[in-house]
Image (cartoon, helix red, strand yellow):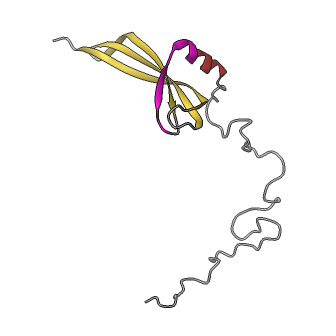
Amino acid sequence: MIIFGTRRTVQQLAMVLLTCGTCHRTAANALLKIVTKFTLFFVPLFPVRTRYAVQCTACGASGQIDKDRAEQMQASAPPAPSGFAGPAPGSGMPQPPYPGPSPYGGQSPYPGQQAYPGQAAYSGQPPYPGPQQYPGAR
């Protein structure tokens, strides 16, 4: 008995910013490479078909594109960071270690210390007196 078939693998090539044709929102879209391989005894041997697609991260709709368009989109996409060490440079988020002055005015935002100028120190108690009985409540 010979067992044969196909196996499909999906590889994400890049994330690109596009306007979705389904939800009409400008959102990140995953550029995908879908390869179908012939398998013999569950071992992938050779590719049978290669397709490219984009998938909207907002609504999940996907559409097939040709190889030339996929290569153009991949070339124009920003490079993926190697490993994750925090937010991407130029994303508007502070980079570790935090550059410039602290947003807390040099003081710790933790309980017992003043976080912002003019703000009272945190006492560890809730800002309200506790559970209250409302008129008419039983």
Q: Position of residue 88 (x, y in %)?
A: 68, 36
- Percent from the top left, x then y, of residue 53? 49, 23
**Magenta region:** 59-70
Q: Which quadrant of the figure has residue 50?
A: top left
Which of these two is toward me, 90 or 55? Answer: 55
Residue 55: x, y in percent?
50, 30
Vertical side of 127 occupied by 81: above or below:
above
Q: Residue at x 61, y 20 (%)?
A: 73
* Residue ID at (47%, 90%): 136
Residue sticking out furthest to the left: 1
Q: Give whichever of 9, 32 is nearer the camera.
A: 32
Q: Is residue 113 left or right of residue 64?
A: right
Q: Give the quarter of the image for residue 84.
A: top right
* Quadrant where the image shows the C terminus: bottom left
Q: Quadrant of the N terminus?
A: top left
Is residue 91 magenta-colored?
A: no
How many numbered badges does the structure rendering display? 0
> Is 114 rendered above or below residue 32?
below
Please tell me whether residue 67 belongs to the stretch shown in magenta.
Answer: yes
Instruction: Where is residue 51? Give x, y as percent.
Output: 45, 16
Q: Name the residue: 79% across, 65% down.
A: 116
The reply, left or right, for residue 136 in relation to residue 79 is left
Q: Write down the quadrant of residue 75 in the picture.
A: top right
The residue at 66%/21% (across/down) is: 76
